[in-house]
Structures are given as C-alpha cells and as structure tokens.
Amino acid sequence: MKQGFPIRARDKIKNRQELTELISKLKKTGKSVVFTNGCFDLLHPGHVRYLEAARELGDILVVGVNSDDSVRRIKGKGKPFVPESERAEMIGALHSVNFVTTFSEDTPQTLIEELLPDVLVKGGDWSKDQIVGRETVEKNGGHVIATNFEKGFSTTGIVERIRSGKKSDTLP
C-alpha cells in the first residue's frame, strides 16, 4: 500500500459494504471523495483522460462499474464485450483510481446515496440536469461536474474499426 491506499488493481476492488465503511472513515479524516461511474467496456484514452480529470477534483476517486446484467439492459444484447470483473480490474489498474465497485442497478443512484460523495462527475456528453444522483449530492452539500468530453474516442468506434478491418489512424 502506498500512502494507505492499495496499489494492486484487484486490491482496489471493494464490495459495497466494504466501500461504504471505508469511504465513511476517509471522509471523517477530511478526505474529499469524488465518484463517477460507467460501463467502461473497452478501455480507451477517452476513459483514461476522463478519470484523470475526475481524480484532480478531490482526494479519492471511486469508480462504479456497471455489472454485466446492467450493461446488457442499457446497451443491449451482445454487450458487454468484457466481463465486469475484468472491467473493474482494468479500471483499478489506473493510477488515478483509488477504489472500484460494481453495481447491478441500471443507474448508480443507490450507490451514490450510500457513499454521499463530495463531488459527482460525469463526462461532458451529459448535461448537469441529466446526471443521476445530482440532487442527492447537491442536497448534501456536494458538487456535480460535467467534465470536458474527449472527442474521437469511443467503444462504438473501436468496435466499428475492428469489424471493418480498418487500422487506426494513429497506428503505423
């Protein structure tokens, strides 16, 4: 552990009860908690940059990853491409992320109510009034932020490129 936080990706993954207790203790020490969520099916630079920007908004970044069942309900049959345990581990491997948990609901509302983060972040493709959990966070004195959207990166774009056999413009 570095500065009291896990370094190994798998050690950053917590169940909801563990995470709720841990975040409560950390908040009592004055740490500010940032929360964001997503499917993170095929990790790409847009995700990495988004999570780095989110981490800069507080002391601890917690990421909620949609479960496989949740992704199927939201994105449709054939998704996700990567199982939730692997998606959570990949997110946990990022230096900017302190803790990861999965949630099975279609939205992170209940998880947000349990964690009560100081800052709730979503990508700029979401307007502030569309961000699930906004009212809960603001009612409890927190802030809701829509970060800049990283254009040119998407899971859909990766899948289309793979299916078409087209090389990425950035590859040699």
Image (tube, grey):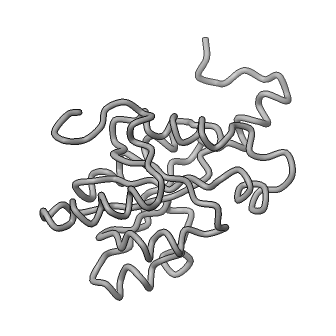
> Could you tell me which quadrant the N terminus lies in?
top left
- Residue at 44% x, 57% y is 148
Q: Is residue 1 above or below residue 30?
A: above
> Could you tell me which quadrant the C terminus lies in?
top right
Q: With 14 as the anchor, is 73 left or right in this view?
A: right
Q: Is residue 144 above or below residue 53?
A: below
Where is residue 117 shown, x and y percent of the image?
34, 69
Residue 6 is drawn in which quadrant? Answer: top left
Q: With 99 as the anchor, is 83 left or right in this view?
A: right
* Nearest to the observer: residue 68 or residue 34: 68
**Which residue occupies the extreme left position in the image?**
29
Q: Is residue 88 above or below residue 116?
A: above
Q: With 54 as the anchor, is 3 left or right in this view?
A: left
Report the number of numbered marks.
0
**Which residue occupies the extreme top position in the image?**
172
Where is residue 141 shown, x and y percent of the image?
27, 83
* Nearest to the observer: residue 138 or residue 46: 138
- Residue at 33% x, 61% y is 34
- Residue at 49% x, 69% y is 111
- Residue at 42% x, 73% y is 114
Residue 137 is drawn in which quadrant? Answer: bottom left
Where is residue 115 shown, x and y percent of the image?
38, 69
Q: Is residue 114 above or below residue 95?
A: below
